[in-house]
Image (cartoon, grey):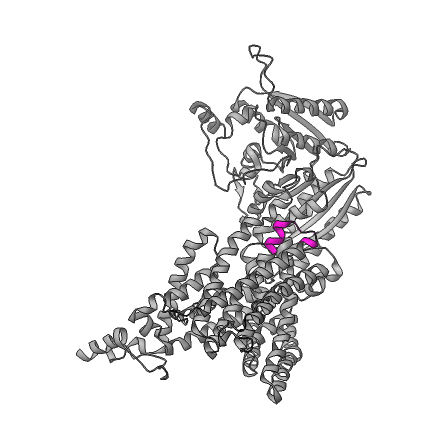
Amino acid sequence: MEEQKNLLTDGINGFRPDCNVPLPATSSGFWLSSSPLQASIPLVMIQMTIIFLICKSLHFVLMRFGQPTIVSQILTGIILGPLFLGKFELIGNDIYRPNSLIPLKTLGFIGLGFFLFIIGVKTDLNMVWKSGKRAVGIGFVGNLVSLLPVVCAHFLLTNLLPEDLSVNHTSSKDVLYFWCMSSFVVIASVVDDLKLLNSKVGRLAISISLIYDLFNIVLARILTSIQIGSARGVGSIASFFGLLAFVLLVARPITLRLLKLTPKGELLDEVYFATVVMLSLTCGFLSEVAGHGLEVGMFVLGLALPSGPPLGITLVEKLEGITLTLGIPIFVASVGISIEPFVVGNNSWCYLVFMLLLSFCGKVAGTVASAIFFDFPIYDAVALALILASKGIIELRLISYWQFGHTMKPEYVTTILIYVAFLVAVTTPVIRFLYNPSKHYTSDQSNMRNIEQTKSNYELRIIACIHSEENVTPIVHLLETLNADPCPICVYVLHLVQLVGQAMSSLIPYNRKERNYGSSADSSSDAIMNVFRNLEDRSENCITIQPFVSTSPSETMHDEVGNLALEKMVSFIIIPFHKTVCSESSTLASLPNHAARTMNANVLSYAPCSVGILANSTQGSPLPRDVVVYFFGGSDDREALSLAMRMSQNPRISLTVIRFVPPYDSSAESPRTPTQYDESAMLDEDIIEEFRMNYVMDNRVVYTEEIVADVEETIKAIQSITPNFTLLIIGRRIGADSVLAKCMSMWSEYPELGDIGDLVASTNYGTQLSILVIQQQATIVNATPTMSSVQYRTDRCSSSATQKTHQTN
């Protein structure tokens, strides 16, 4: 027992193994006199656990300050390194002793390789040819202006620099050249973290970095061969092209064959997936043997394979999670753990910081200047420059290379690592502050368009958003109600596809000939567009269809909708409600789609034109023949009535407009002082008068007024009238002077439908009813509709009125 006690004490507090002695794989256990810290497997497990706990704890705090994950990972390594916790015996000399880091670093490098392989598969190389002169020009000027000042300063300060930072030192050249470039992997990760994949700046940054990163990969191999010299240099460059030959002639054809054997819309099966993983590891092995690093071979293989489904989705489902959760944190933290403290009294690291800052300033200045030359707004140009100046996982790979090869002094490595962490921590919040793509199409009020301002005989431009084939029929039927000869419409059909297995979002016109038929999303797009083409053919030239397909993250789909609306000068956007109105119960049918609901809320807040949310019944969506408009007053109701005026031109549609008005009060003070509400009331009267004079005819188009004294009478009237119609059109925000505005807004389960829309959608009418809730985007909406399930507001109603309302429902 005494022996076991001494062994445990040695293993935890005082064990000092030889760093050159390999550790055994497993431990026999404490009870057989074996310390768990003297074996690789239990040691790596405790190392990973500590890294995971510290990293997640730091990110839980730092994410509230807008910091990306990599900052937490770098700080985790620094904290566990010799600068902080590594000073203690248990951490620095027992758990994270030098010879115990080899298995940990091995796992980290394999995780890095798979991460780059996944990024490569997600990348579409067609972006290189589609980038255009702007991407090439901005990237060239930014890299050149970043490199030239550093090179000039390096030569001018040669006599003042330490020997290991001189012009002839290899590591110094690496810092000079590679630190001035932009890595595609880093930029793609930054753009993804900032949720800018479908923004103009994000797309341009990814295109620029991809173009010059491909150039840098080849150039780096050539420079390496020149440094080696003689026959070995020729062998180095030959081995790289041999690796390319293996990727293009062996690995790619095998993978393409496996993809063809995979049924459409399904993931790769286990055997095919294992084969792809084996090929990636083989490329990493060949690249490592040739001296180029395993990550180069795995990344090149990823670039050579087709992006998107089924391969991209399979890798995301089966490999990306564990890579991002364990592989990358282990790699980044292991780099920080291996750093060493500064040497007291040595100021040579100051020269290195000066060079790094000079490179950063040159990159920002060159990119901003060239972007402004291409007519970029100043804020967009600065945001683009900061994104392209970002550093990350690839720079950490270069640091680990210096650590393994001992080609740079420890204090320089520590300086560069801290610089990377500081740069990312500062630039990321600044980019978030400077650039918000959602504000670009709402910042100029002159770009705001709506139906009310569009003359009835002018073309009405509409965007119809489609998430799935289930959304098609209700929207097609709604468009058919607008199919009237004197009222032409142009419909931009936008199929919204969630970005999975790809690194860059896209918004492109639909072209059946260019579709990839290995994707279920492409097949769905074909089916959707065929329906709308048929609608165009039978519309007698009144409806024009322009199909588009958007592939983007669900969090930023609204940006694609807003950008398209701004570009095409659209007046009205139709988006499907995230649930289906249920006619068999008093609730809504459960079709959970939180991404669609979030997108709807964002479109309502940021769209540069009017928005309509269409909810349809579970019994089906028949062609609406009987249409009713509830008019309470306000801009949204005027917009709803404006749309109804266009529908009234369709002879196959019967339209009823019901205006809810309070009883006449002879004791009311008159006249009142003019207010904003009086101006809105005057506009209400004008549009009602226009409708009565120009559109009301026989029994097909009817106008009537419903007198209601309070909330209870209003709800009863709605419940008695609604079952007689198949389409209800209502404004989302009711007039401020109406009875409902004062009392009915006590609860709202679905605020995106407004008070009336929420009431109707939540009531059982036993009919095939569709609801179109319209919001006129005359001004920017300040607040996004909340997603809380129920909101109670009792400040404007008495308890008795509340009780009556609930009894009525």
In the picture as drawn, the residue positioned furthest to the left comes out as 2
Side (left or right) of 688 relative to 287 = right
For residue 670, above or below residue 713:
above
Q: Residue at x 53, y 77 (%)?
A: 169
Determine the image quadrant of residue 504.
bottom right
From the viewer's side, name the closer residue of 471 and 561: 561
Position of residue 419 measured from the top left corner of the image (x, y, whole percent): 48, 63
Whether 378 is among the magenta residues is yes
Q: Residue at x 53, y 71 (%)?
A: 114
In the picture as drawn, the residue positioned furthest to the bottom comes out as 231
Determine the image quadrant of residue 553.
bottom right
How many marks can you see? 0
Q: Quadrant of the N terminus?
A: bottom left
Position of residue 140 measured from the top left corner of the image (x, y, whole percent): 67, 64
Magenta region, residue range:
372-384
Prevailing secondary structure class for the magenta stretch in the rendered image: helix
Position of residue 261 measured from the top left corner of the image (x, y, whole percent): 64, 71
Q: Would residue 520 be seen by someone viewing this image from the given angle?
A: yes
From the viewer's side, name the closer residue of 619 and 205: 205
Q: Residue at x 69, y 40 (%)?
A: 447
From the viewer's side, name the closer residue of 298 and 205: 205
Whether 584 is among the magenta residues is no
From the viewer's side, name the closer residue of 782 and 737: 782
